[in-house]
Image (cartoon, rainbow, N blue to C red):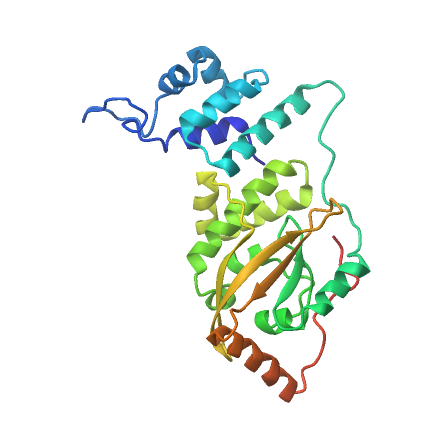
């Protein structure tokens, strides 16, 4: 699903030669750095770097990877992704060894479901690395207007046109989703369900195809999330992600409103409207697969 060679090519094309100390003129036709320039700046032979980009080189050392990360201007997330892709190549080339399939079919632990029930004043949901929503509390179900189990936020954002209006900052949300899935593909290269999801998104969305080709990676653990709910209007919330300590790859996402803010009033109104209409069904799915 992802590979070291492709990642190096896309990062190289984005480096400003002038910022790397390389003089340029109007005759330059290459976008970003040339292969030989990357090789020279990182202290490796041109032949070796060419073989890296062609997927023919042996496992690069940590020192080589660090040098490439420096020359290519990688941030912390991209640097970790680069090293992860290189480790995959080592495992793939090792005889008798491979990467075990990811994404077992377990149930959400009852203790995690209890945590969701305790979050009463903010939408909260459990999500895996494929962006499948495994369970959510009542306010999460009211925010999305549907039961939580069975929702995949990547499909929701890219493929369900009628739902696009829910995301007040839709374009930035798409960047976050693609960046997250790129990281997930690097961490779970043999997850068939993840590969199937990526293929489905690529077939159904031109924007996904364009963003995926950029090979950007994003790790988002907190930040602003804005929703435009059809009943209560704009909700400017803050998302915090909490990784489950059991190694399952699940995360608890909580969307909180600042005290005294219009968003806090909006969430309170949303909960009240649902109560007035008799919609008090819980959104938590106790038997959702991991």
Nearer-the-camera pick, 199 or 28: 28
Q: Position of residue 102 (x, y in %)?
A: 72, 41
Q: Position of residue 280 (x, y in %)?
A: 70, 81
Q: Residue furthest front?
A: 259
Residue at the image position 74 percent from the left and 52 percent from the top: 290
Residue at the image position 44 percent from the left and 39 percent from the top: 214
Nearer-the-camera pick, 243 or 183: 243
Q: Position of residue 92 (x, y in %)?
A: 67, 24
Q: Residue furthest left?
A: 26
Residue 54 visible at all: no
Residue at the image position 41 percent from the left and 16 percent from the top: 39
Q: Is residue 149 left or right of residue 20?
A: right
Nearer-the-camera pick, 11 or 121: 121
Residue 186 visible at all: yes
Q: Is residue 88 left or right of residue 168?
A: right
Q: Is residue 141 left or right of residue 106?
A: left
């Amino acid at each position: 699903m992802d590979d070291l060679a492709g990642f190096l090519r896309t990062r190289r094309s984005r480096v400003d030669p002038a910022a790397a100390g390389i003089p340029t003129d109007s005759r330059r036709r290459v976008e970003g750095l040339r292969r030989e320039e990357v090789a020279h700046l990182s202290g490796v032979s041109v032949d070796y770097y060419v073989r890296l980009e062609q997927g023919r080189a042996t496992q690069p050392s940590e020192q080589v990877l660090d040098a490439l990360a420096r020359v290519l201007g990688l941030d912390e997330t991209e640097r970790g992704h680069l090293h992860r892709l290189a480790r995959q190549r080592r495992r793939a080339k090792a005889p008798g060894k491979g990467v075990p399939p990811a994404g077992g079919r377990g149930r959400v632990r009852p203790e995690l479901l209890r945590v969701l029930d305790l979050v009463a004043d903010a939408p909260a949901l459990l999500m895996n690395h494929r962006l499948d929503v495994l369970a959510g509390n009542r306010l999460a179900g009211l925010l999305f207007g549907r039961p939580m189990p069975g929702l995949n936020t990547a499909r929701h954002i890219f493929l369900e046109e009628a739902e696009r209006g829910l995301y007040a900052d839709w374009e930035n949300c798409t960047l976050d989703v693609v960046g997250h899935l790129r990281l997930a593909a690097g961490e779970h290269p043999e997850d068939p369900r993840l590969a199937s999801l990526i293929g489905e998104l690529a077939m159904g969305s031109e924007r996904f195809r364009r963003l995926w080709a950029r090979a950007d990676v994003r790790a988002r653990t907190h930040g602003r999330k804005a929703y435009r709910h059809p009943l209560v209007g704009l909700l400017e919330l803050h998302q915090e992600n909490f990784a489950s300590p059991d190694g399952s790859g699940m995360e608890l996402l909580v969307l909180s409103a600042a005290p005294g803010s219009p968003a806090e009033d909006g969430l309170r109104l949303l909960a009240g409207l649902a109560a007035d209409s008799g919609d008090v069904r819980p959104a938590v799915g106790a038997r959702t697969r991991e």
